Image (cartoon, rainbow, N blue to C red):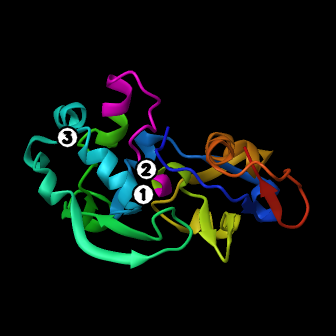
């Protein structure tokens, strides 16, 4: 999957394991609403994307095939990431999309061009997808991975959850994202369902 690896154990809040009456949305419902903004990426991710232009370009919208426009100049310190800082993918106006803007990698079919290219090349769909996009709607706050409350998730019109019909564990709803984090994190800890848990691969 991603080129990133984290030598330290990844910590999870207890909210990852809570019970929930929500369900994940479907692409036809949200139309890639979470791609409203660009995303912060480690320079390792940026360079990996640019090194694979031949595979990625055919899956980009035709008007967005200039890789010089894919990333902004702004960068921000982020000690969590291997490089110690991150850069943002570009956004473009789109009045038809949720919020009126979208990530430059979003296609008209609401799919991520990076994910489409990964699949077409025979890789895991997340091979070139940015780390934060993969784990969404899990967030990293105060040194741990967590998920917003059910109330907050439902209040977000363009969010990734809808009202469900049965009670589930949030960790079941986020099984793919958790498995991904398990694969890239350190190997020294165990998952615990109470309190803050360390999750490792």
Question: Which secondary structure lies at badge 2?
Answer: helix
Residue 68 horizontal side relative to residue 146, left or right: left
Observer-side mark, 2 or 1, equals 1
The residue at 39%/21% (across/down) is: 122
Residue 41 percent location from the top left of the image? 39, 61
Q: Position of residue 48 (x, y in %)?
A: 33, 46
Question: Which residue sits furthest top?
Answer: 122
> Residue under circle 1?
34
Observer-nearest of 82 and 73? 82
Residue segment shown in magenta: 117-132
Q: Position of residue 140 (x, y in %)?
A: 61, 67
Label 3 – label 1 distance at C-alpha: 18 Å
Please tell me which residue lies in front, 40 or 152.
40
Q: Is residue 111 visible?
A: no
Q: Indicate the position of residue 29 as horizontal and vertical percent values.
A: 44, 45
Q: Residues within 10 Å of mark 2 (few under 14, many from 20)?
A: some
Disc 3 vs disc 1: which is toward the camera? 3
Q: Which mark is residue 30?
A: 2
Q: Earlier in the sequence, mark 3 or mark 1?
A: 1
7 or 37, nearer to the observer: 7
Residue plotted at (16% across, 42% down): 61
Crowding around mark 3 (Cα neighbors within 10 Å: few <14, some 14 to 19, many 20+) is many
- What distance separates the C-alpha of mark 2 from that of mark 1? 8 Å
Q: Which mark is residue 60?
A: 3
């Amino acid at each position: 999957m991603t080129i990133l690896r984290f030598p330290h154990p990844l910590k999870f809040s207890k909210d990852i394991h809570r019970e929930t009456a929500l369900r994940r949305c479907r692409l036809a419902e949200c139309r890639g609403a979470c791609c409203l903004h660009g995303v912060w990426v480690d320079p390792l991710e940026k360079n990996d994307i640019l090194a694979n232009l031949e595979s990625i370009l055919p899956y980009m919208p035709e008007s967005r095939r200039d890789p010089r426009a894919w990333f902004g100049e702004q960068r921000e310190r982020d000690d969590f990431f291997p490089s110690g800082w991150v850069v943002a993918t570009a956004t473009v106006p789109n009045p038809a999309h949720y919020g009126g803007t979208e990530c430059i990698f979003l296609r008209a079919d609401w799919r991520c061009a990076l994910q489409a290219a990964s699949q077409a090349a025979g890789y895991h769909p997340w091979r070139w997808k940015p780390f934060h996009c993969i784990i969404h709607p899990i967030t990293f706050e105060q040194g741990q991975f967590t998920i917003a409350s059910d109330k907050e998730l439902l209040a977000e019109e363009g969010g990734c959850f809808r009202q469900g019909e049965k009670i589930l564990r949030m960790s079941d709803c986020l099984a793919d994202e958790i498995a991904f984090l398990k694969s890239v994190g350190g190997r020294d800890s165990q998952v615990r369902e109470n309190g803050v848990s360390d999750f490792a691969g």
